[in-house]
Image: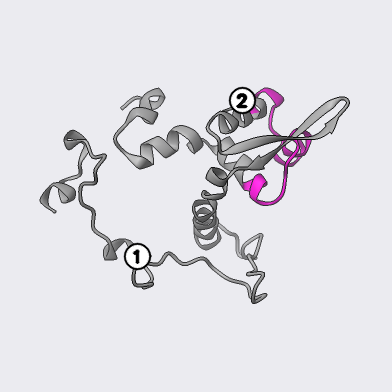
Amino acid sequence: MRWEDLDREACSVARTLSVVGDRWTLLVLRECFLGTRRFEEFEQRLGIARHVLADRLKKLTEADVLTKVAYQERPRREEYRLSEKGRDLYPVMMTLAQWGDKHMAGPEGPPLLRVHNACTHVMEGVLVCSDCGEPLAARDVSVKAGPGAAEATLPAAAKRA
């Protein structure tokens, strides 16, 4: 499997990584979810080289994860906003942040707490079954071949199912 061919793999994780699979892209997305929208704000908050930032924003825009929206006409200035496709990455970002809070935070604790606006409590996201609502862990889930599966890439567990 070659890095530049990930978008053609019969694997949803590989295809996703073809869009968001580097550290700068994930940090750009983190900033988007924290409300950053303008190029200069991304540059300042991330300390990223302009050409690297421009490349990541272009890639996310071409993948329809971000959309460019004009906020000024003369001269034309645009900001970056999460599209529906981009907003759908929120559970991924939440899970990465929670993993970091648990396994990578220092003794002083996590740098940010997430508060549920509806009830105002500090919270953690929980992955649940869409059918019965039970919380899920890896051992609670098995896989089986789906309509887009390629026989050669199926894990052994899916071939038995």
Placement of the N terminus among the 4 image quadrants: top left
Q: Which mark is residue 55?
A: 2
Residue 157: x, y in percent?
A: 17, 51
Residue 132: x, y in percent?
A: 34, 72
- Residue 68 lies, with reference to residue 144, above or below; the image says above
The magenta segment: 30-52
Q: Which mark is residue 106?
A: none
Q: Amino acid at mark 2?
A: Asp
Q: Amino acid at mark 1?
A: Ala
**Residue at 17% of width from left, 34% of height from top?**
152
Seen from the viewer's position, the closer of residues 134 and 110 is 134
Residue 82: x, y in percent?
A: 62, 44
- Residue 8 lies, with reference to residue 105, above or below; the image says above
Seen from the viewer's position, the closer of residues 116 and 109 is 116
Magenta stretch: includes residue 1: no
> In the visual, does 125 lie left or right of 131?
right
**Residue at 39% of width from left, 30% of height from top?**
7
Placement of the C terminus among the 4 image quadrants: bottom left
Dominant SS in magenta: helix
Q: Which residue does the numbered mark 1 point to in the structure image?
A: 137
